[in-house]
Image: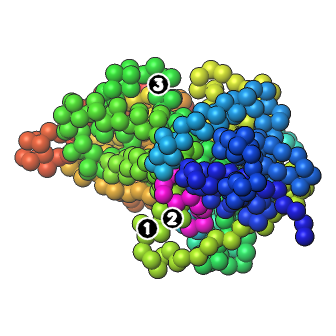
Amino acid sequence: MELKPTLLFDGDCGFCRYWIARWRAVTGERVEYVPYQEAAEHLTEEAKEKFSRAVHLLEPDGQEFDAAEAVFRALAHAPGRGALLWWYQNVPGFAPISEAVYRLVASNRPFFSKATRLMFGASAKPPTFAIARWLFTRWVAVVFLVAFVSLWVQVDGLIGSHGILPARDYLGAMKRGFGPARYWAVPTLCWWRSSDAYLRYFCGAGAAAAALCALGVFQGPMLLACWALYLSLVAVGQEFLSFQWDILLLETGLLAAFLASWKPRDRLSRQSRPPAAPLWLLWWLLFRLMFESGAAKLASGDPAWRNFTALAYHYETQCLPTWIAWYAHRLPGWAQLASTAATLAIELVLPFLIFAPKRPRILAFAGLALLQVLIAATGNYCFFNLLALGLCVLLLDDETLRAALPKRWTPRYEAAVAPRRSRPRAAVAACLVGVILAVSADGLLSIFGESLPGVRPVAAMLQPLRSINRYGLFAVMTTVRNEIVIEGSDDGKSWKPYEFKWKPGDVRRKPAFVAPHQPRLDWQMWFAVLGSYQQNPWLIHTMARLLQNSKPVAALLAGNPFRDVPPVMMRAVVYRYRFTDAETRAKSGAWWQRELQGLYCPVISLRNAPPRESP
């Protein structure tokens, strides 16, 4: 019979029994766990004292190890669990620190026993995330489905041949500017075909792949297909697909493909434990998304964040507020201060609990999920909140989800252990993980003006894939709301406004819910007013298309005041918008009040391509 490593422990210690049960679940039958009391009658008093102070590992070759090293060596017998032993043997300072911590814990077992149960829960079994994986992969597929369908209904007007920024023209410019390097600089299937029909085809193919993934069919390949198709559209989408949630979806989707099942059909009752590397990388992504957003707010030096007044402006000045934002804007000053402080605390503190034991991790889920729900209630942020909530789901282990979800959704089963990878595959995976961690850590450090040596060239090389990103939402708070109104005229005296579908225009129109759909032209109009029209040439292209009576572009708007014959000239003016107070809204029904600020873009016409100043 083959001899096995044997770990001797104090069987009378409840703390020891808890952790032995946990380690046994990890190593399985590869290691024997024996209370030293079973051999107590054969031991001297000195030996009993030694075994009561620390665990001892007896290897089949006769070697003996104790304390922290014994634990690390025992765990290293399980596949993929040798990292701690490697650190112990190779990283300076790790071994003495580990042994010091072990001695501290061993000499205060009652305290750490209570702390263990408080942090990890009553069950000694290591957490598994099979149900979370099952939910998450489908969740990401639904977000992809939403993103593809949302773009599908706009793609002709945005980047079609008669759209605002035609993809065909953009690819032609890239071909002239980059030559053969264009295929990496602009990684897109549109190099093959970029006609309007194919742009719609890519959206439809992506939606179909997402639907199949949501149904559990070839999830891994379908998620990779979604990633490739969405990257193809983002790469040619220019300003209209340059939002943080677009790159967040690409990064999440790529990692989700390696977390997902690659079997023909994924069933909850046949789940295996998800591979550790993509699960931890997705936790790391959620950490970066939230912590970088909080850090960017403080690092920007914006006084609105530093004096906790940011949310006193946010509800009114955000891109597409909902009607709930009108009420949130009316909250008293102390509530705005408290909610701003709470936002910063959630983004800067709770992310560290993502890597903590079970109960702190559940606390992180609750706080981060609550923040996303509140953001979604007061503003239309497309599929961002839905995607962030999906990442939060991965923080919940199977035991927690079984307790929270209906029983028919969470059948009781033991998640099978994933098969061990071959050494070449494991080596490739380790290299990829190393690159992702290095590039993403460098992005995080860049917020503080620091960097990792030698990483920036690698990050620059991988940037076209948009799958290892830096985040930082609302780093600087906009304190006033200016809105661009596009107007057309036949005589230069009487001007008619073009009404958008979702952004503020008519002061009596109630702010509505449109998420998870993203009206991308409405969003770009909010960004345009932060700069000049010269900095936003796409706006000139929009006005030119309306002068040409382009149907795809006109379809992006709520109405066309020149439906039959296009106007002779166009201009853009700026209004200052503010929420009305309760009394004004009760009397007039207006949600907004506005005041003309002046001209944003001078009069243009098809006859005078260079814009001229309005008289």
Say which amino acid is labelled 1. Answer: Ala
Q: Residue 234, position in %: x, y?
A: 64, 50
Residue at (24% x, 39% y) in the render: 329
Q: Quadrant of residue 562?
A: bottom left
Q: Quadrant of residue 53?
A: top right
Q: Can the viewer see residue 207?
A: no
Q: Please give left or right for residue 533 compared with residue 331 in the image.
A: right
Say which amino acid is labelled 3. Answer: Leu
Disc 1 on helix, strand or loop?
helix
Q: Is residue 540 above or below residue 224?
A: above
> Is 512 in front, or is 594?
512
> Which secondary structure is most common in the magenta stretch?
loop
Q: Residue 127, position in %: x, y?
A: 58, 59
Q: Quadrant of the N terminus?
A: bottom right
> Mark number for residue 403?
1
Disc 2 on helix, strand or loop?
helix
> Mark number for residue 399?
2
> Mark number for residue 298?
3
Q: CA distance from mark 1 to mark 3?
A: 38 Å
Residue at (26% x, 49% y) in the render: 324
Residue at (51% x, 64% y) in the render: 399
